[in-house]
Image (spheres, rainbow, N blue to C red):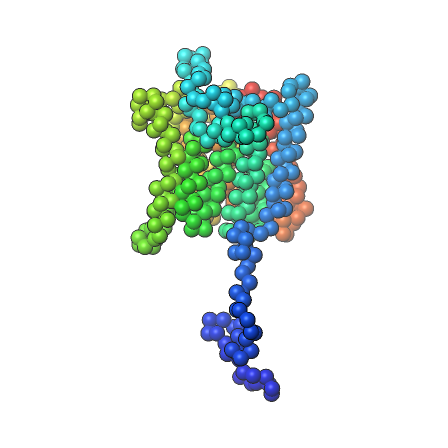
Amino acid sequence: MHVLPGVPKVNRVSTSSVPRPPESAAPSGPLRRPALPRIARRGTPEGALPALALFVSVRLAGILVVLVTNALRGHPLLRALAHSWDSRWYLHIAAHGYGHKIWITPQGAVQSDWAFFPLYPGLIRALTTVLPLTPGQSALLIAWAAAGVAAYGVYAVGHHLYGRGVATALVALWAALPHSVELTIAYTESLFAALAIWSLYCVLRGRWLWAGALAALAGLSRPSGFAIAVAVSLAAGYEALRRRGRVPVSLWAGAVLAPLGWLGYVLWVGSRMGDVLGGYFTVQSAWDSRFDFGVGSARFLKALLLHGGGVVYPASLVIVAAGVLLFALLCLERAPLVLVVFAGVLILLVVGGSGSFSSKPRFLLPAFPLLIPMARALARSWRNRPAHAMVVYGALTVVSLLFGAYVTAVARSPL
């Protein structure tokens, strides 16, 4: 190496090509730690603000379209948001607790409030206790706040795996799903999504204790909490096998914590019903909600082909079919195991479960990993053909706003 006159020779670290000044040239005083990347200093991904602003804009537009639709139809403006279908059950539980409301169907089935998980009504009651809000207002505030937290989680997962462009596209697509209006009504989807998505993020970052705790809370929010419990526990088991058992205690603790919320409520309802293991599933059967390995879905498809079904039911079938296709593409993407398992279990519960088909699209709302292949394609399109990407996304958003207003304020199909 040639050395210029008057310039001292410097040593080089063997693992890097960056020169290090000699010790004699070190500055006096305490040593300064090297600056960390912004993502490491903050512990959260950078560049999320534009994506979150887009999410909020789309969902506010969705609420506005619902309000306008209600006004044109002469309906109360906010009633469709705070008092639709299952919302009434959650509000009643928040006000009076469990065991005080039943509904007898025309077929004679006795539907009880034990079918609804406790976290959402518990939060509603807590908020009405500390703030001068009605239960309906509290329910909407929780749902809207949770939707924002969930959107940030979607961005965090996308940024961690693919970078800012794909993460932004992932949030944008999640905001504009045809059934995403249900993120902004008094339902549990946004709360469950927020807890489950951040649990997935913690798994990807190796924060197993947090992952298990968030999965346990998600399991207290709705029946599909089973999906995140399975995803976290299987991911922990796979990681233990990969490391040949040499894993921190936090990994095992997270795996044990993950199913406790869902399992605890199921067993508690069973004990109240006099059948610890089967009582909860008896309650769900009265709501025609059980896993029948796709028999109910096949019957629905046959009836739809023979008799038709307006707008909502064919659209629901298309959404569910698209979810199955996107799951296949997600597997081809070789996405992380925890994301594939989470989305796969939700798909399995939707396709293999009975119940009203019009409700099935919202069960897939938390399954944002299904959107990863589309998000990567949209990000590439934005880089190469931004005008084309804007037209496609704009069309998807318009369809989402109109469909959301229709199912919320016009259609009488169960949400």
Percent across and percent down for residue 287 are 42, 21
Nearer to me, 377 or 407:
407
Residue at x-position 52% and y-position 73%: 17
Residue at x-position 58% and y-position 52%: 46
Nearer to me, 380 or 242:
242
Q: Quadrant of residue 390?
A: top right
Whether residue 84 is situated above or below residue 363 in the rendered picture: above
Nearer to me, 214 or 25:
25
Residue at x-position 61% and y-position 33%: 400
Whether residue 11 is situated above or below residue 32 in the rendered picture: below
- Answer yes or no: is residue 339 visible: no
- Answer yes or no: is residue 176 visible: yes
Percent across and percent down for residue 413 are 53, 21
Relative to residue 403, is residue 249 drawn left or right?
left
Nearer to me, 78 or 171:
78
Q: Quadrant of residue 395?
A: top right
